Amino acid sequence: MELSRHGISSLLVERHPGTAIFPKARLISTRTMEIFRAWGIAEEVESAGMPREDVLAVGVGTSLASDDFVRAAAAIDRDAPQSPTYTYLCSQDILEVILRRVAESHPRSDVRFATTMTDLRVTADGVEATIEPTAGPAAGPETGQAPDPTTGPGSLGGNGPVLVRARYLVAADGSRSGIRERLGIEVVGPPPLGHMVSVMFDADLGELPADRRVALSFLRSDPPCAVEAVDNKRRWMIQTGYDPSTGGSAADFTEEACVAAVRSAVGLPDLPVTVVGVMPWLQQAVVATVFRDGPVFLAGDAAHATTPQGGFGMNCGIQDAHNLAWKLAAVLTGTAGTELLATYDAERRPIAVRTVDESLVNALITLRMMQGQLSMGQAIEQQAERRSSEGLILGFRYESAAVVPDGTPDPAPADPYRTYVPTARPGHRAPHVWLSSREGRVSTLDLLGPAFTLMTPTGSGWVQPAKEAAHRLSVTLSVVEISRASEREPDAPLTSPTWAAEYGVGDTGAVLVRPDGHVGWRSPGGAASQAALAGALGAILARS
């Protein structure tokens, strides 16, 4: 989708016959919702997901029906003003349908389901890959997908092997990435935390009080498990584990055993339960040692596998794609030098390491409660606090050759996981500020598109130098002037009395925002300079 926005043709090869039926991921972070807003699908995702007030509630207890069950929720009111949108809960099986439809609507996107890459060779000018129809049902326990005779419009159908040549390849083939292994790229991190099984089931939990039907609960049932709401109506999921060292295996989770586990977790021994699917998986927290090898890039779980606690994995993967796509496009169109691609690893790997580490912290809270090292009161307090993670989600920064530092200090909140401090310091996500327009209220983030954007106060003198710099480098650059809404400019298209201060610029300052929404360069003031802006653009785009 993002490559299409930049005018780049791409081929997606997916071995499964259709989108996922198992909701492995549910939580869509604030930053990912901002990306969806830019893609024009945020409202559709919200209408397909759970009500926002149900998203951040978490509970602990012996079961959902037990007297010791306690519930808490994160502080939505504190974090929500930092963005024009906010965290949302939309399960992966529903989300993928939306993404697939939009991806297939782009003429430059060739989306092929039921198709497998069977061979890969790196060449002097890119890659050669052999792709062919997936042999037999592509379902696997790691996905929960069932055989489906329906394939995407780009499916190869009954054709034989096809040779594909491409300049670059993005490997998003999961935590057990065969491409990563083929390249000899290792992963680092602690040993697996456990062998897990997810059981998706259908049941009417209407007998429970409404406050027990929360988005996520951690229970000391038999066996201990987590219960997740899929639609918060009839579709639910439990996650539990087994120990191979004591003879346990995924085969132990027969339909009878799954029904018994669900009833123990809910606390209603006669609850009618229909098991929809069972998915074994490995809980781990690892990161690839590098995210790139020549023309091949790792993204998503192939690059980093988080624990599910916190809901970070899918979001981190989507933001990998968001970071990489504009860089690939800039190089492929000749706008940037190839060294720009080195900044993908430099920018995304540190974020992945931090994200994986924070997911591990969340998982250990649950583990300590299950082992009796934390009381339920202590566990619910810590879990609720960790559900608020805007410092991690919005406060991360990039440091690479594609960022021109301005010498200002990085914000240092006491709790960098929970607390987000808005800043337009180069490397950070451009802050959200509400602006007044002739059509109504608009966010600064709504002004950003697939090109570079220069934001500057009205009358700063940057408009003409920006046009000259863009022409000089053959770069598409959008210039946005924002007025302070003084009496001298009553009809200004965009106004805000606070924007300039929040972005750290004076009356003659300017902020250059990259296509991925991160600030690449900032001039706090002084005379507008075509040479300074052209120099910044050239540095970001590796134009030597």
Image (spheres, rainbow, N blue to C red):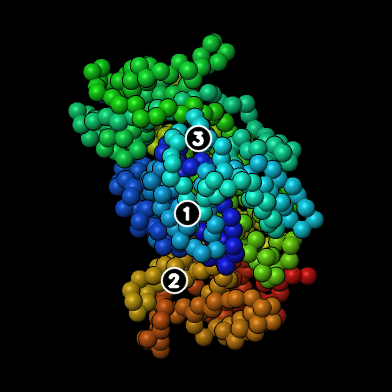
Instruction: Give the quarter of the figure containing the C terminus.
Output: bottom right
Number of the front mark, 2 or 3: 3
Residue designated by label 1 = 153
* Side (left or right) of 202 relative to 91: left
Q: Amino acid at mark 3?
A: Pro
Residue 450, position as x, y percentages in the image: 54, 67
**Furthest-right residue in this view:** 124
At horizontal 37% and vertical 19% (from top left) the residue drawn is 255
Q: Secondary structure at mark 3?
A: loop
At horizontal 54% and vertical 46% (from top left) the residue drawn is 158
Q: Is residue 264 above or below residue 435?
A: above
Along the line of sight, which residue is nearer the eye, 241 or 255? 255
At horizontal 77% and vertical 58% (from top left) the residue drawn is 125
State which tag comes first along the sequence, 1 or 3.
Answer: 3
- Alpha-carbon span between mark 2 and mark 1: 49 Å
**Residue 277 at least partly seen:** yes
Q: Which mark is residue 208?
A: none
**Furthest-left residue in this view:** 207
Q: Label 2: how many residues lie within 10 Å, few (<14), some (14-19) or many (20+)?
A: some
Q: Is residue 287 above or below residue 409?
A: above
Q: Amino acid at mark 2?
A: Thr
Q: Secondary structure at mark 1?
A: loop
Q: Label 1: how many residues lie within 10 Å, few (<14), some (14-19) or many (20+)?
A: few
Q: Are marks 2 and 3 in contact (CB under 8 Å)?
A: no
Number of the front mark, 2 or 1: 1
Residue designated by label 3 = 137
Residue designated by label 2 = 498
- Alpha-carbon span between mark 1 and mark 3: 18 Å
Residue 251, position as x, y percentages in the image: 48, 17
**Residue 518 at least partly seen:** no
Q: Secondary structure at mark 2?
A: loop
